[in-house]
Amino acid sequence: MTVFPSFLEDHSIRHRLRLQTLTRLRWLAVIGQSVTVLIIAHGYGFDVPELFCFALIACSAWMNVFLSVRFPAAHRLPPLGATAVLSFDVLQLSGLLFMTGGLANPFSVLLCVPVIISSASQPVRHTLSLGVLSVTAATILAFFSLPLPWYPGSTIEVPFLLILGVWIAIVSTMAFTAFYSFQVSAEANQLADALAATELVLQREQHISALDGLAAAAAHELGTPLATIQVVAREMEKALVDDPRFTDDLMLLRSQTERCRDILRRLTSLSAEDEAHMIRLPLRSLIEEVIAPHREFGITIDVVHGDSEMRETIGRRNPAILFGLGNLIENAVDFAETRVTVTVSHDRDRVEISIDDDGPGFAPDVLTQIGVPFMNRRGRQDREKGGGLGLGLFIAKTLLERSGASLEFANKPPPATGAHVKVSWPREKMDLYGSDKML
């Protein structure tokens, strides 16, 4: 029942970093590096090798100009190209740090930035290679660099223990922030994929629900040209009535046009008769429509309607509700041993649908992650453990919550076994006519 779009498994586009993003960040770096060198050299009067520093800054600016001319602004770099560009940034920054004190320079922490950018957008192997390059650069700078710029005629000695502490801080910060950024980005991408799948499923259900309207429109549009064909056929029959060569063809043409008119007449009448049914859907009909496709799998599905003095709710046909409930029923049937029970109740304030099965229930790890689109495949072992729920359940939960429902997932209390799912709506969300009328 659940459809998984094939594009969800294709991550090549996601790992293409937009070139304009990198060039903008590099222009900010160029401006920041230039201002910093000028302030240190002329504001504080420290002894800074300005010529070499601005030569490296010019290399970064030249790289931006070259990339902007070579590629359009919307160009997306493949992982290898993005890694090469970020590696250039690491080497350029390492050169600046080498001439300005190495790890004793407070700005040495910026070596983490390219790795963090890569972890949020690039494959793991490329991020690891960039991390190795950055750690190697930091290690070299810990031992080899020009003195930290200071007032002319004096130098500042930085203890090696402090340099070691800075190296440890850079490496640990790089590892932690890169891992955290990777996790956040992966979860965001996973959620985006799941929401995209949800939208596609909802569109599919809406298209199916609209087929009756399309049939009526087609019948209406085809009626006029078909009537014209029928009139022409009659005129031809009158004109060629005495010519035996065309008698059979004319009779066939007339019979087929009559057949077409009969088909269009039935489509039109079918749409007219079912229009009210397709728009308004009583609660009992909704439940039966959701359950019907799952009755042929060897699992007994019992429907229990609670006693209520309130009139049964009559809602508007909602593809999101139909698909969401259908997916919950499908999961219950898949995991049940022999029986699934659907309990329906409604009162003046709420409409509730409970789905219970006699299977193994939700595994503890699954119960804590329900609604999270973790896309694992369902197998026999998953079924025995009560696992295997993922994107399909996320889609169902999302669609039902969009309709105004609240969902509860739990296992039956011992000694009973099985899963329990309750879906609840405010009555006004499910009833076109309000809750004032009694049975």
Image: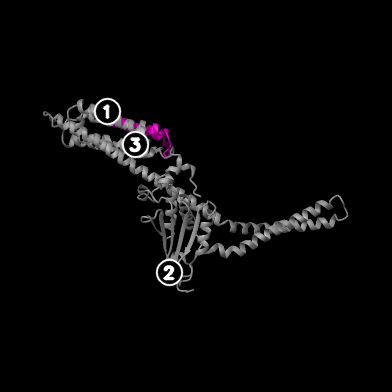
Tell me which amino acid carries mark 1: Thr
Tell me which amino acid carries mark 3: Ser
Magenta: predominant secondary structure element?
Answer: helix
Query: Residue farthest to the front?
Result: 415
Residue 347: assigned label:
2
Front label number (2 vs 1): 2
Circles 2 and 1: CB atoms closer than 8 Å: no
Tell me which amino acid carries mark 2: Asp
Residue 377 image-quadrant placement: top left
The CA span between labels 3 and 2 is 55 Å
Q: Earlier in the sequence, mark 2 or mark 1?
A: 1
169 sits left or right of 366 in the view: left
Secondary structure of the residue carrying numbered label 3: helix
Secondary structure of the residue carrying numbered label 1: helix
The CA span between labels 3 and 1 is 17 Å
How would you rate the neighbour count of disc 1 (Cα within 10 Å): few for under 14, some for 14-19, many for 20 or more?
few
Residue 430 visible in the picture: yes
How would you rate the neighbour count of disc 2 (Cα within 10 Å): few for under 14, some for 14-19, many for 20 or more?
some
Residue 124 image-quadrant placement: top left
150 sits left or right of 176 in the view: left
Residue 317 visible in the picture: no
Nearest the eye: 390 or 269: 390
* Region of the chain picked out in magenta, as a range: 53-82
Secondary structure of the residue carrying numbered label 2: loop
Query: Residue farthest to the right?
Result: 242
Residue indicated by mark 1: 136
Q: Earlier in the sequence, mark 3 or mark 2?
A: 3
Magenta span includes 79: yes
Residue 184 position in % (x across, y down) = 33, 44
Query: Residue farthest to the top?
Result: 144
